[in-house]
Amino acid sequence: MIPTREQALELVRKYNKEDSHIHHAVAVENTMRHFAGLYHEDPDLWGVVGLLHDIDWEMTASTPEKHCHVAPELLKDVGVDEDIIHAVQSHGFGICTDVEPSNNLEKTLFTIDELTGLVITAGLVRPSKSLADLELKSVKKKWKDKAFARGVNRDIIKQGAEKMNMPLDDVISETIIALRPVEKEIGM
């Protein structure tokens, strides 16, 4: 089964109670939908994967090595397709799983999971506290400051852009564009 957006969001909310985690899921969902359009793929499928990618986050917060390992059981229990489960697991490649991203959907999720956090944080420190006036050069400047958004693994983003065969600047620019329409929904 491929869940609807509503079903996926309900599942995410069942296992994640913190607003910040729901906001992150929606940010990744919308960024995935945007990139699906660039690849001429199904935005609904990509969006659902984006929503579900951290379904086990709060359950595994104290044992991060288990992240992406509880998710398959949660998703199998409700009959979610194996392709979606594989995609969810692949976003933890090299961190907490050995499931390598193998298609455009998975490579994009691997990349933008980390990148959305950097872009949103860069928007929040602007005088406008918005993404509307955020530009690539501002994100690149923050990128170089290792103390800024210290939890964001820039190496993963670079690896992901390479996996996507897309210049890093383009991935960042497209992520900014993808997040602008949902900035209120994601807590900005």
Image (tube, grey):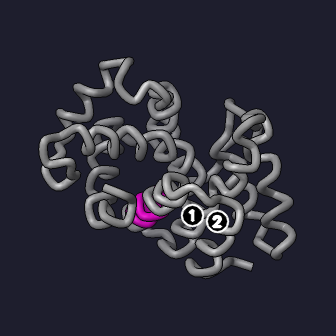
Q: Main secondary structure of the magenta part?
A: helix
Residue 169 position within the rendered picture, expressed as x and y whole percent measured from the top left: 29, 37
Q: Is label 1 in a helix, a strand or a loop?
A: helix
Query: Within 10 Å of the Cα at label 1, are there few (<14), some (14-19), or many (20+) other Cα atoms?
Result: many
Which residue lies at the image location 58% right of the left edge and 69% below the top edge? Answer: 48
**Which residues are drawn in magenta?**
28-36
- What residue does disc 1 label? 51
Residue 9, quarter of picture: bottom right
Which residue does the image show at 76% across and 71% down from the upper left? 81
Task: Say which of 40 and 186 sits in front.
Answer: 186
Tag 2 and tag 1, C-beta contact below 8 Å: yes
Give the image location of residue 47, x and y in percent.
Answer: 52, 68
* Label of residue 12 in the image: 2
The local crowd at label 2, few if under 14, some if 14 to 19, many if 20 or more residues have their Cα within 10 Å, is many
User: For the residues carrying marks 2 and 1, which lies nearer the camera in this image?
Assistant: 2
Badge 2 or badge 1: first in the primary sequence: 2
Q: Position of residue 178 (x, y in %)?
A: 32, 59
Q: Is residue 33 magenta?
A: yes
Q: CA distance from mark 2 to mark 1?
A: 7 Å
Mark 2 residue type: Val
Work out whether 156 lies above or below 130: above
Q: Position of residue 173 (x, y in %)?
A: 27, 46
